[in-house]
Amino acid sequence: LGIVNSEKFPVIPRGGGTGLTGGALAVNGGLVIAFERFNRIIDIDTANRMAVVEPGVVNGILQEEAEKSKLFYPVNPASMDSCSLGGNVAEATGGANTVRYGTTRNYITGMKAVTGSGDIWNAGGKVVKNSTDQSLIQLMCGSEGTLSIFTELTFRLIQKPVKNTWIIAPFKDIYRIPALAGKIFSMDYNPTMVELMDSDTLTYCSSYLKMDIQFSRFHQLLVRFDSGSPDELKKISVKTGEMCLEYGAEDVLVADTKAEQEKIWKIRSSIHDAIVNEAKCVCEEDVVVPVGRVAELIKDVYLISEKHGFPVAIFGHMGDGNMHLNFTAGGGSRPGELSGRIERLREDVFKAALGLGGRLSGEHGIGISKKPFFGKFIDAGYIRLLKNIKKEFDPNNILNPGKIFDTSALR
């Protein structure tokens, strides 16, 4: 990095390449550092419940290795079988388990990295509490490769849950699902996962997977509970099932076996690929709003869909308000007109989310695709601070230039 910095030559770190906002693209050329072979699990420390890894380790591989020691890494993005842990840190990745276990930010405890100037720095380690240099580690989360390149990461692990159960409830009325989710959150026991999948999403999955999905023509709520007590889990399942029926569910399906749960996760984790392959998806956004305002967001999104003529498939995380909105191609436009229509659609989506107290992205990041809207809608004072931080870590603007905000003025 010292050499390329002296030449002011761009460097783009690339993990698993699963990002959805163009964060790992060399849009202006440069040196791409691919981390696929930087994939060693250096240590699974069972005594301290910590894992030390290189940044190219795939999320799902760490989960498998931790499980061998009856430990658990709970951050589970749908792309966990291909996304890298370095990329997870760069995007501050969440996932379906966020409602109970949190995001990558809650598990990263140590980091070794290199700045754009070639300076090597270390922070944290195998410690759970840290008031010394944890703030620097948190600064790197969500930085999208613009501040430093990671060379080693340390993650906290937890005890693997003894048992879990998954519940699916199909509904004719999608607005019953946010109302029911609020009721579930008020229970004495926290759910691990509270997911929404609308009927269009499930129809695409059924076609893509060539699988008969029960109640695929209905909107579905997916809830998961973890517990160390089978008796407690049974009581929670019964209570949740009764609540689902009270709120108008057509039925309640309970998955207790590993095979049943793996089938459900296969459906849930295939959604992105299903929509891309089965429908002409022209716009995919991951706005986030306060949990209690998801129903309002859904209503606004349907109105925006109708206004612009792009059908929408909705799925997402009811537990943290992060909704994934997938707009598919509508008719009536020549190819040259499509781009402008999509940008006007996206602007309306972002305005709706911000108007509800939300933000542009819950977990996909800004990258290049959201950059114009980031500059338009996010506080100018905040962006100035980000640029000043960028100058400290990367004065010649060689690390992933052009991502998040315009960095041409930094040079």
Image: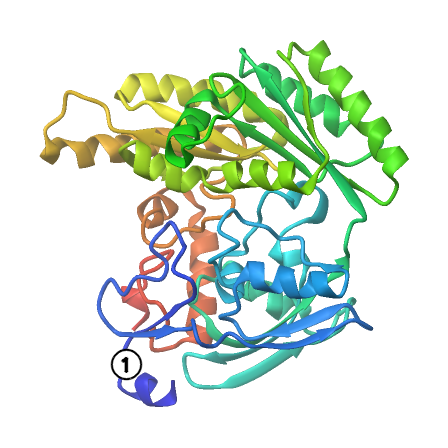
Q: Count the numbered circles shown.
A: 1
Residue 97, position as x, y percentages in the image: 65, 44
- Viewer-side residue, 217 vs 33: 217
Residue 291, position as x, y percentages in the image: 62, 31
**Residue at 38% from the left image edge and 29% from the top image edge:** 207
275 over 45 or under it: above or below: above
312 over 4 or under it: above or below: above
Image quadrant in which the C terminus is located: bottom left
- Viewer-side residue, 277 vs 3: 277
Residue 42: quarter of image: bottom right
**Residue at 88% from the left image edge and 41% from the top image edge:** 229
Residue 264, position as x, y percentages in the image: 58, 36
Determine whether the residue tagged by mark 1 lies in a helix, strand or loop: loop
Q: What residue is disc 1 on? A: 8
| Res. 352 in view | no
**Residue at 61% from the left image edge and 22% from the top image edge:** 178
| Res. 282 in view | yes
Residue 277 relative to residue 301: left or right: left
**Residue at 38% from the left image edge and 37% from the top image edge:** 274
Residue 122 relative to residue 303: left or right: right
Which residue type carries mark 1?
Lys
- Viewer-side residue, 158 vs 346: 158
Image quadrant in which the N terminus is located: bottom left
42 over 339 or under it: above or below: below
- Viewer-side residue, 20 vs 41: 41
Decide: few, some or many residues near mark 1? Use Cα within 10 Å; few <14, some 14-19, many ≥20. some
The colour scheme used to paint the residues is rainbow
Residue 75, position as x, y percentages in the image: 62, 53
Residue 237 relative to residue 254: left or right: right
Residue 353 relative to residue 255: left or right: left
